[in-house]
Image (cartoon, coloured by chain):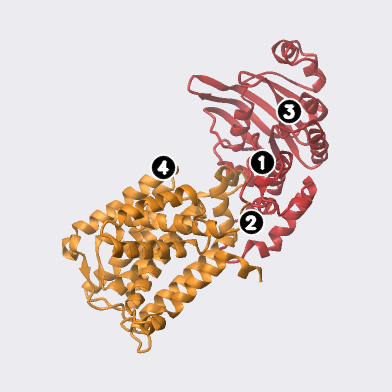
Chain colours: A red, B orange
């Protein structure tokens, strides 16, 4: 990627967040350019999910600024950020378990169509919701499972549904918090292929533990340790970064890197 | 039709059918007393349906819901006391009062969750309860007699006429179930049910749930207020007891007993609850000793209430 022509979509400037005495996010800055997959990696407790919560608006930063598509969104609510096109998925599957898969996605489609103060017409007759929702389920590979209650879907299917809900809000930017969490190797391969395909339409910030996935997908990688950025660069740069190797990748526990 | 094979629907049809014919059937079998019993139960059923709307479908466990019975009832009582008997003034004012109070109470209590929500709805309702107790002019503890029922000013629609009164209540009950059904299945209802299931996720698809939850709270308050104004008319009497916190608790129990989050559950719940307490009270003076453990058993072993017991196991998941 040509650095001179970077079109920055999402930018975190000196974000700070602490919980009691614990510094979860420590003067963190990063930039995500248009069309790239920017991965954030780091050991457990590095503050990766906190970062997604801050960027998506579920948590308020103690300091710093978040800029999305040129606008300061630091004070915007989570729901207002989604309406601007900044969608997220959750590390711990967050779906409507009592709803069918179709209803899960319909609610997200509905959210993108303006207010929901419509009290009378049954949603199950509303093709403006049903058609796009079906299409989205087809797209993530759940086309045959539309009428299954979400709580009864297999774990991998729930992860797919999670992504489908996020995509159905019609975003331009995706914050993906460990989309492969708890998936088997085959399901992970499927998800990697799917994310590659999504890359054509969306800019993404990807939190992921699975190093194979990270190095297969990411254009750039930011490494977090104790809430701090210790390195940012291309996968090759990160692989060869001495600090990263010492702090994280080269550790004997993690074993081989990509 | 599949609908007719579902035991819950059959039970619902029986209850509604019974309500429809009681004014003719009860005198025919020599028990005219049951007309007033059914009328009373139907009013409780309306209140239970309204509570189920927010509790069963919206996850908002209000422990002060009976306050709207009181507000609706007292609006009628106080206006009648001052000589305003026209229904065209009384009813809109009663509905408006309930809308206003539920808007204020909802706006405050919906900022909290869980146990705090339960406690704050109770506390707010108690404020109105004590207000009614302290209102000496309107009878305090003793309540307030209503000398004339709401007057619609037309010959053919007179609430003093027994059948008119009865079928007005019946029509409101049917309408409240119908309105709930439409609401729950609308876009509004999808957001409301989503907020109950996973509020964070609703926010994360771009919907701020507060106003939706508040609207549902107000709709339920108004619906319950209508039950209150009917009760005031039926009994020709209002008293603080209508909105005692125990009434709120009983409403919660009717909903749970009949089947929370089912359209018709609260109606059967109200019937079983009130009939059973009536029957038990006629057997023994210490009927609470039987009734209490029964309620505990229902909560422990029949979590879906009556509707849950009637739903075939295969259809539950």
Q: Are marks 4 and 3 in contact (CB under 8 Å)?
A: no
| Tag shown at residue A86 | 1
Circle 4 packing at 10 Å, graded few (<14), some (14-19), many (20+), is: few
Q: Is residue A1 visible?
A: no
Tell if the residue under mark 1 belongs to the same chain as the one under mark 3: yes
Within 10 Å of disc 1 (Cα), the crowding (few <14, some 14-19, many 20+) is: many
How far separated are the C-alphas under marks 2 and 3?
Answer: 44 Å
Residue A217 visible in the shown view: yes
**Which residue shows up at 21% across the image and 65% down it?**
B143
State how far apart marks 1 and 3 are (Cα): 16 Å
B196, B18: nearer the viewer: B18
Q: Are marks 1 and 2 on the same chain?
A: no
- Tell me the subunit letter for badge 3: A
Q: Nearer the viewer, residue A148 or B103?
A: A148
Label 3 sits on a secondary structure element that is strand
- Tell me the distance, in whole angstroms, between the alpha carbons under discs 1 and 2: 38 Å
Residue at image location 42% in from the left, 58% down from the top: B254
- The numbered disc on residue B315 is 2
In this view, the mark in front (4 or 2)? 2
Q: Residues within 10 Å of mark 2 (few under 14, many from 20)?
A: few
Discs 4, 3: same chain? no
The spot of residue A178 in percent (x, y) is 70, 32
Q: Position of residue A138 (x, y in %)?
A: 79, 50
Q: Is residue B203 left or right of residue B165?
A: right
Q: Are marks 2 and 3 in contact (CB under 8 Å)?
A: no
List the residue tagged with mark 4: B115
């Amino acid at each position: 990627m040509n650095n001179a022509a970077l079109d920055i979509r999402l930018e975190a400037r000196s974000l700070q967040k602490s919980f009691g005495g614990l510094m979860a996010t420590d003067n963190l800055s990063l930039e995500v350019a248009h069309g790239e997959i920017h991965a954030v990696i780091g050991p457990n407790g590095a503050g990766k999910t906190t970062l997604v919560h801050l960027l998506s608006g579920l948590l308020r930063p103690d300091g710093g600024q978040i800029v999305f598509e040129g606008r300061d969104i630091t004070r915007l609510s989570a729901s207002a950020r989604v309406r601007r096109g900044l969608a997220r998925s959750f590390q711990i599957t967050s779906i409507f378990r009592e709803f069918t898969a179709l209803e899960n996605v319909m609610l997200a489609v509905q959210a993108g169509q303006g207010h929901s103060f419509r009290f009378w017409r049954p949603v199950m007759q509303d093709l403006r919701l049903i058609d796009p929702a079906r299409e989205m389920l087809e797209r993530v590979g759940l086309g045959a499972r539309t009428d299954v209650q979400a709580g009864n879907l297999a774990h991998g299917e729930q992860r797919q549904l999670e992504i489908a809900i996020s995509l159905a809000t019609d975003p331009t930017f995706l914050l993906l918090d460990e989309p492969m969490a708890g998936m088997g190797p085959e399901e992970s391969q499927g998800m990697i292929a799917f994310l590659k395909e999504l890359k054509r339409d969306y800019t993404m910030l990807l939190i992921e533990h699975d190093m194979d996935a990270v190095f297969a997908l990411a254009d750039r990688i930011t490494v977090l340790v104790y809430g701090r950025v210790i390195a940012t660069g291309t996968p090759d740069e990160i692989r060869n970064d001495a600090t990263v190797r010492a702090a994280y990748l080269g550790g004997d526990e993690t074993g081989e890197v990509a | 039709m599949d609908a007719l094979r579902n035991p819950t629907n059959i039970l619902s049809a029986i209850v509604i059918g019974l309500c429809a014919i009681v004014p003719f059937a009860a005198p025919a079998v020599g028990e005219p007393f049951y007309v007033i019993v059914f009328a009373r139960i139907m009013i409780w059923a309306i209140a239970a349906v309204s509570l189920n709307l927010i509790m069963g479908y919206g996850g908002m466990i209000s422990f002060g819901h009976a306050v709207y019975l009181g507000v609706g009832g007292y609006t009628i009582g106080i206006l009648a006391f001052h000589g305003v008997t026209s229904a065209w003034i009384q009813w809109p004012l009663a509905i408006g009062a309930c809308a206003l109070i539920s808007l204020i109470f909802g706006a405050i209590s919906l900022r909290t969750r869980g146990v705090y929500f339960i406690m704050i709805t109770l506390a707010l309702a108690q404020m109105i309860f004590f207000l009614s107790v302290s209102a000496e002019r309107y009878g305090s503890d003793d309540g307030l007699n209503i000398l004339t029922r709401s007057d619609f000013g037309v010959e053919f629609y007179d609430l003093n006429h027994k059948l008119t009164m009865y079928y007005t209540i019946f029509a409101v009950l049917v309408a409240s179930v119908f309105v709930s059904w439409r609401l729950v299945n609308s876009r509004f209802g999808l957001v409301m049910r989503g907020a109950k299931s996973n509020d964070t996720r609703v926010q994360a698809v771009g919907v701020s749930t507060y106003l939706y939850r508040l609207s549902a709270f107000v709709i339920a308050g108004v619906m319950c207020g209508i039950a209150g104004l009917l009760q005031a008319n039926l009994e020709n009497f209002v008293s603080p007891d209508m909105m005692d916190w125990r009434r709120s608790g009983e409403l919660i129990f009717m909903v749970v007993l009949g089947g929370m989050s089912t359209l018709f559950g609260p109606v059967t719940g109200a019937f079983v609850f009130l009939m059973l307490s009536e029957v038990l009270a006629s057997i023994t003076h210490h009927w609470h000793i039987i009734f209490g453990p029964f309620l505990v058993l229902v909560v422990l072993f029949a979590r879906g209430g009556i509707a849950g017991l009637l739903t075939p196991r295969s259809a539950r998941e």
